[in-house]
Image (cartoon, grey):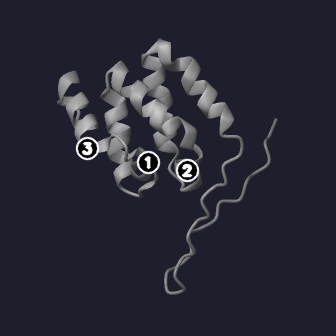
């Protein structure tokens, strides 16, 4: 995606992703492709992504995929006309539950835990 020109990105989005963004954004692997698309997408594609995914921003957050939201906000930052809409959708998320970390299997050793140290002033 990083080598596609804007018409190629439009074609990729409209041919394969439009209408499927909620599932793509919440998918464990596919969300990374959406992030790369948003990193390089022209304004009209970002606008379509925002209109489709904006009402459902809490879904990727609840699945533990904040990168989708960060990429969408980064794309809106590059296209100032979309910043207001992106912020409105973000503020409507309210509280999205965090994804719970998966427990480690019993046969795997636990990682060392770092204890916070008091600040020396």
Circles 2 and 3 in contact, beta carbons < 8 Å: no
Q: Which residue is mark 3?
A: 16
Q: Which residue is mark 1?
A: 25
Q: Is residue 50 above or below residue 78?
A: below
Q: Earlier in the sequence, mark 2 or mark 3?
A: 3
Q: Secondary structure at mark 1?
A: helix
Q: Position of residue 117 (x, y in %)?
A: 75, 51
Depth check, mark 1 against mark 3: the one in front is: 3
Q: Earlier in the sequence, mark 1 or mark 3?
A: 3
**Which of the 4 image quarters holds residue 34?**
top left
User: In the image, 38: left or right of 16?
Assistant: right
Out of 61 and 44, give the one closest to the viewer. Answer: 44
User: In the image, 92: left or right of 66?
Assistant: right
Q: Secondary structure at mark 3?
A: helix
Out of 82 and 29, give the one closest to the viewer. Answer: 82
Circles 1 and 3 in contact, beta carbons < 8 Å: no
Q: Residues within 10 Å of mark 3 (few under 14, many from 20)?
A: few
Q: Earlier in the sequence, mark 2 or mark 1?
A: 1
Q: Residues within 10 Å of mark 2 (few under 14, many from 20)?
A: some
Numbered circle sitting on residue 59 = 2
Quarter occupied by the C terminus: top right
**Which of the 4 image quarters holds residue 84?**
top right
What residue is drawn where x is 48% and y is 19%? Answer: 77
Alpha carbons under labels 1 and 3: distance apart: 14 Å
């Amino acid at each position: 995606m990083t080598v596609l020109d804007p018409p190629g990105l439009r074609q990729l989005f409209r041919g394969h992703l439009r209408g499927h963004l909620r599932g793509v954004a919440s998918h464990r692997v596919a969300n990374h492709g959406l992030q790369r698309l948003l990193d390089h997408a022209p304004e009209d594609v970002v606008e379509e992504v925002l209109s489709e995914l904006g009402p459902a921003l809490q879904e990727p957050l609840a699945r533990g995929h904040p990168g989708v939201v960060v990429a969408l906000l980064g794309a809106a930052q590059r296209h100032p006309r979309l910043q207001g809409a992106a912020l409105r959708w973000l503020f409507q998320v309210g509280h999205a539950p965090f994804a719970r970390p998966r427990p480690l299997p019993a046969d795997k050793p636990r990682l060392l835990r770092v204890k916070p140290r008091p600040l020396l002033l």
